[in-house]
Amino acid sequence: MAEGLRRTTTRGRGSLLAVGAVCVVVFVVAAVAVLVLPGPAEESGSDLPGSASSHGIESGVAVAVDPLRDDSDYRDVVTDHHTSVTAENTLKWVHVQPERHEFDWSGSDTVLGH
């Protein structure tokens, strides 16, 4: 009877040692990752277009006409952080040709003007 109890205790210690070893490995991997990987970027004016271009990536955004025309913060984000723009809805037919033989290009002109 004492022998059966001893096996159970030994098996429990083995599982406990395995769990402890896994925890040590996870801790070591996390510590190495913290030391090797770069930290968060400084907030001193992000250069998203420059960073993207250095990796061969163009950064674009779809823009709405009203905020682009009326909201300077929106306009600043678009011009400071993206290299190309796409008109969000202003080039859809319902906006470009609201009536037969009547065309309204003011929305697309606003996008091109900024």
Image (cartoon, rainbow, N blue to C red):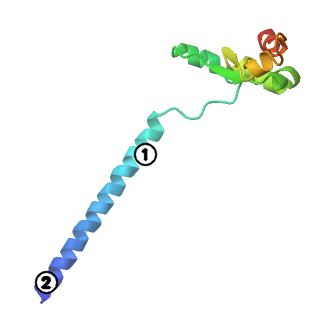
**Residue at which label 1 appears:** 30
Q: Which mark is residue 4?
A: 2
Nearer to the camera, 62 or 9: 62
Residue 35 is left or right of residue 24, and the answer is right
Nearer to the camera, 81 or 63: 63
Nearer to the camera, 32 or 95: 95
Residue placed at 19% from the left, 78% from the top? 8
What amino acid is at disc 1? Answer: Ala
Residue 11 is left or right of residue 109, and the answer is left
Question: From this viewpoint, is residue 47 visible?
Answer: no
Where residue 65 sits in the image (x, y, percent)? 81, 22
Residue 16 is left or right of residue 55, and the answer is left
Q: Is residue 34 above or below residue 68?
A: below
Say which element carries label 2. helix
Classify mark 2: residues with Cα within 10 Å, few (<14), some (14-19) or many (20+). few
* Residue lying at the far bottom of the rendered structure: 1
Where residue 107 sits in the image (x, y, percent)? 81, 16
Residue placed at 84% from the left, 17% from the top? 99
Tell me the quadrant of the picture where the C terminus can be found.
Answer: top right
Nearer to the camera, 42 or 47: 47
Where residue 53 sits in the image (x, y, percent)? 57, 14
Q: Earlier in the sequence, mark 2 or mark 1?
A: 2
Instruction: State yes or no: discs 2 and 1 in contact (Cβ < 8 Å).
Output: no
Question: From this viewpoint, is residue 48 visible?
Answer: yes
Q: CA distance from mark 2 to mark 1?
A: 39 Å
Residue placed at 67% from the left, 24% from the top? 46
* Residue lying at the far right of the rendered structure: 70
Residue 15 is left or right of residue 71, and the answer is left
Where residue 68 sits in the image (x, y, percent)? 81, 22
What amino acid is at disc 2? Answer: Gly
Give the quadrant of residue 109.
top right
Give the quadrant of residue 1.
bottom left
